[in-house]
Amino acid sequence: MRNHHVATCVTAAALGASALALLAPAAQAREPVTFTPFTIPANRCGFPIDVGVVANSEYQDVVTLADGTTVTRIRGRLVLSFTNAATGSSIVRNVSGPTTETDHPDGTGTFVGEGLNWFAFGPVSQANTGEPGLVFTSGLVVLQFAGGAVADFSLDGEQTNGCELLGG
């Protein structure tokens, strides 16, 4: 079922990309992606996680379509550190993607990631998807979101539970 859903989402994403070629963008910009260290709250894994930047050379291409839909493609290298703030246990992960996110004016959207990615799921997203609070993925991952939460998570690849890695 997971692979069928991924194929459906990938097909939809490909159709969306084809449609983008037909629509004239209202605005387009290429810019570096800034990443500021922050702390993932304890409600994700049961302990706070400090996220730091080891290396970042990511850039993003942002296209805003006439209907207000925004498509953001991120490429480049991103390596982050994840530290259990309670114990000091730390890991470093290459999470360079690449990724494409499509955000619609109604607050719904799709995230498509290839390669290496990471996700921090809040309580609602965890309940919706059954995923742990911190996930590292390798392969094709598709997330559907609405109302500030992930509604569906599909992966054609492998994942690692980051909460378990950091001692939770």
Image: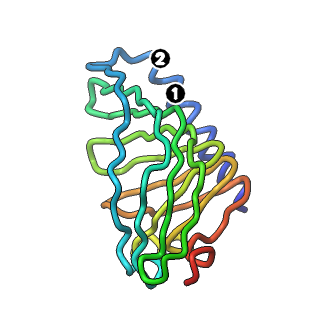
Residue 33 percent location from the top left of the image: 37, 36
Q: Residue at x 57, y 51 (%)?
A: 117
- Using the numbered discs, state the Cα–Cα distance from disc 1 to disc 2 in whole angstroms: 7 Å
Residue shown at 31%/25% (left/top)?
65
* Residue 41 image-quadrant placement: bottom left
Is 22 located above or below residue 108 in the figure? above
Task: Report the residue at 38% width, 80% height from top.
Answer: 42
Quadrant position of residue 90: bottom right
Query: Residue 167 in the image: x percent, y percent?
Result: 58, 82
What label sits on residue 17 in the rendered view?
A: 1
Report the coloring of the rendering.
Answer: rainbow
Considering depth in this image, is 69 or 164 the residue closer to the camera?
A: 164
Query: Which quadrant, please, contains the C terminus?
Result: bottom right
* Vertical side of 56 occupied by 65: above or below: above
Q: Position of residue 106 (x, y in %)?
A: 27, 48
Give the amino acid type for the residue marked by disc 2 in the picture: Ala
Q: Residues within 10 Å of mark 1 (few under 14, many from 20)?
A: some
Q: Residue at x 66, y 66 (%)?
A: 160
Q: Is mark 1 on a helix, strand or loop?
A: helix
The reply to whether the C-beta atoms of the residues labelled 1 and 2 are less than 8 Å apart is yes
Above or below, comparing residue 168 to residue 37 in the picture: below
Say which residue label 2 marks. 21
The answer to whether residue 48 of the structure is visible from this angle is yes
Closest to the observer, 69 or 89: 89
Residue 23: give x, y in percent of width and height.
Answer: 39, 18
Residue 57 located left or right of residue 104: right
Numbered badge on residue 82: none
